Amino acid sequence: MHSTTLDFVPIALMFLVAIGFVATVMLVTHLLGPKRRTKVKQQSFECGIEPQGDAHIPFSVKYFLVAILFVLFDVEVIFMYPWAVNFRQLGFIGFIEMMTFVAFFLIGFVYIIKKGALRWE
């Protein structure tokens, strides 16, 4: 079966309708919704317990950096799974391609270690 760009028109139309619906609902609720801002409404609510101090505690950037690096290297493992499943069919060329992929990530890993991204102080 040969697909043409006309085959994708219903999908594009569905995306446009979905985006249009979300934008319309957000705009209408923003325009028609109540706008009564009081000091009590702006206070944080913690299950009936009076708030103490500022709720905005500054987090170290290191925490977010480690989280992002975890996601990055976790995605690497996700890409390795299909390769491992099809290892025999891909042959030696597939092995070389995966070693190149791993080498790029190892270069990145060495770089973040040299920059001290994983060093906690």
Image: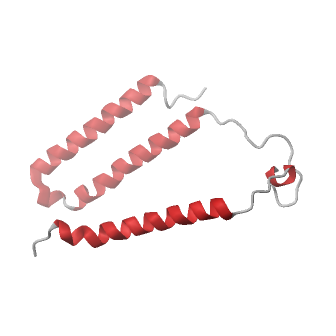
Q: In percent of the image, x 10 and y 72: which residue is there? A: 2
Q: Nearer the viewer, residue 90 or 2?
A: 2
| Residue 15 visible in the displayed image | yes
Residue 110 drawn at (x, y percent): 37, 29
Given the current orientation, which residue lies at the most extreme front position? Answer: 31
Q: Is residue 54 left or right of residue 26?
A: right
Q: How is the image coloured?
A: secondary structure
Kindly indicate the quadrant of the structure image that contains residue 64: top right
Tally the numbered discs.
Answer: 0
Kindly indicate the quadrant of the structure image that contains residue 15: bottom left
Q: Is residue 14 left or right of residue 38?
A: left
Q: Is residue 23 above or below residue 93?
A: below
Q: Nearer the viewer, residue 119 or 31?
A: 31
Residue 12 drawn at (x, y percent): 31, 66
Q: Nearer the viewer, residue 13 or 104?
A: 13
For the C terminus, the image quarter is top right
Residue 58 drawn at (x, y percent): 69, 35
Q: In percent of the image, x 37 and y 50: which residue is there? A: 75
Q: Is residue 85 above or below residue 60?
A: below
Q: Is residue 32 left or right of residue 15?
A: right
| Residue 44 visible in the displayed image | no
Q: In percent of the image, x 41 and y 49: which residue is there? A: 74
Q: In percent of the image, x 45 and y 64: which residue is there? A: 20
Kindly indicate the quadrant of the structure image that contains residue 83: bottom left
Residue 42 drawn at (x, y percent): 80, 50
For the N terminus, the image quarter is bottom left
Q: Is residue 106 left or right of residue 26?
A: left
